[in-house]
Image (tube, rainbow, N blue to C red):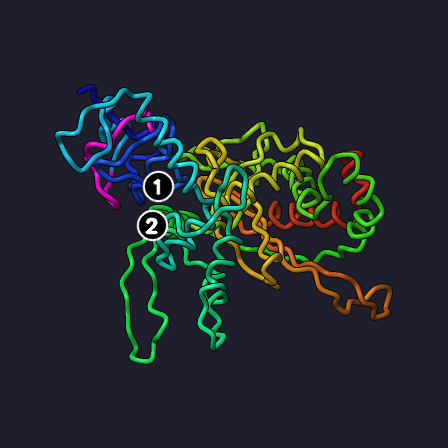
Amino acid sequence: MTIAEVKVPQLSESVAEATLLTWKKKPGEPVALDELLVEIETDKVVLEVPAPSAGVMTELVKKDGESCVSNEVIARIDTEGVASASPTTAKASPAAVAAPAAESAKSTAAMPAAAKLIADNKLAPGSVAGTGKDGRVTKGDVLNALAANAAPSGAPAVAAVVKPLPPVAAPIAADLRDRAEQRVPMSRLRARIAERLLQSQATNAILTTFNEVNMAPVMEMRKRFQEKFEKEHGTKLGFMSFFVKASVAALKKFPIINASVDGNDIVYHGYFDIGIAVGSPRGLVVPILRNADQMSFADIEKKIADFGLKAKESKLSLEELSGGTFSISNGGVFGSMLSTPIINPPQSAILGVHATKDRAVVENGAVVVRPVNYLALSYDHRIIDGREAVLGLVAIKEALEDPARLLFDI
């Protein structure tokens, strides 16, 4: 018997331990080379653990939900074993095991959203025919299967599963007529978010300043160049690239807003790594635009779109979530009118962007209607005085109300 050990991937120095989610294989089942065995959740990302070798799963050292650390052995695979309930079954070669294991994995493979629906509705593995690439089961396949099995009375079976529950959370009781309660442990990411928010509130002297911005110039420029921009760069021209560019322009004028506190020292950063707050099924994450001052509008839009997709699929890497000198939180996409964003430590400031709405404003003594966005800049008053914070937000406002300034760095 030749045993291959399944180990936890190397975690970053800032991650002390992680949590095993759900094993995809049980002892005695065949395993194909590089087949996904389990996902490991850290306080930042979810890591996939592939099979280091083909064979048969012989032992799960760590169970679902248990903690683990870097390079810890969590399972063992017999690279010469044969999947069988009988211990007397003759052993087969690794190639003989890998072939059926790979075929089995291929025939029952389901996309992440589809796999979640299958689990939520307690469908038998392999009961849904896949129409995706290589026979993969898609979300649409599962919904169609559920619709086909729905009761004749027309009960809304599909509607009940269109909005799946967050990963790693136990199902919440739908019937609350008896005032039922259910205790569900926080995921590592949610616990980490809670810890950092409390840390920020406890260690920073947070103050927020507000201003309103006439978004008409940005909207007009965007409308004018949208078609050509998308044709040239293969991505849409959104609003976030304008907010990023305007923020970088303000940070250049007021470097203290881009600084951070380290003990009794102020660390001025000679680079502009902008964090973009992104909602994900697991919670809020803040991937970083590295050297945003050197990025074009197209570069920013493509990177933000990539961040959004990776966050949705829990594919963001530790590198993409580490660091940052300033952050932008866009609550406007959810309809927020105004908020006071909390600083993301060890940064010293964060910009809150909100929904743009037509509002009555006074210009030259007359009341006119303009598309207005209320901006909020939360800052650490320990090192950033009101003057720099207010003028920094005004600089962002002026750049957005005259976006041509961004092209000339003025």
> Disc 1, disc 2: CB below 8 Å?
yes
Q: Is residue 301 above or below residue 207?
A: above
Going from N to C along the chain, the mark reached first, 1 or 2, is 1
Residue drawn 28% across and 26% down?
Answer: 55
Q: Quadrant of residue 358?
A: bottom right
Quick check: is 55 in the magenta stretch?
A: yes
Q: Position of residue 1 (x, y in %)?
A: 17, 20
In this picture, which residue range is highlighted in magenta? 50-67
- Residue on which the image places disc 1: 41
Query: Which residue does the image show at 23% across and 22% down from the upper left?
Result: 80
Residue 127 lies, in percent from the top left, at 40, 52
Name the amino acid type tagged 1.
Answer: Glu
Amino acid under label 2?
Answer: Ser
The image quadrant of residue 98 is top left
Q: Which residue is mark 2?
A: 187
Front-most of 311 and 286? 311
Horizontal and vertical percent position of residue 22: 31, 44
SS label for mark 2: loop
Q: Residue at x 78, y 49 (%)?
A: 218
Q: Residue at x 49, y 71 (%)?
A: 156
Q: Is residue 98 among what the camera can see?
A: yes
Q: Is residue 254 above or below residue 221?
A: above
Q: Nearer the viewer, residue 83 or 353?
A: 83
Cα distance between the residues tagged 1 and 2: 8 Å
Q: Quadrant of the C terminus?
A: top right
- Residue 131 lies in magenta, yes or no? no
Q: Is residue 202 visible?
A: no
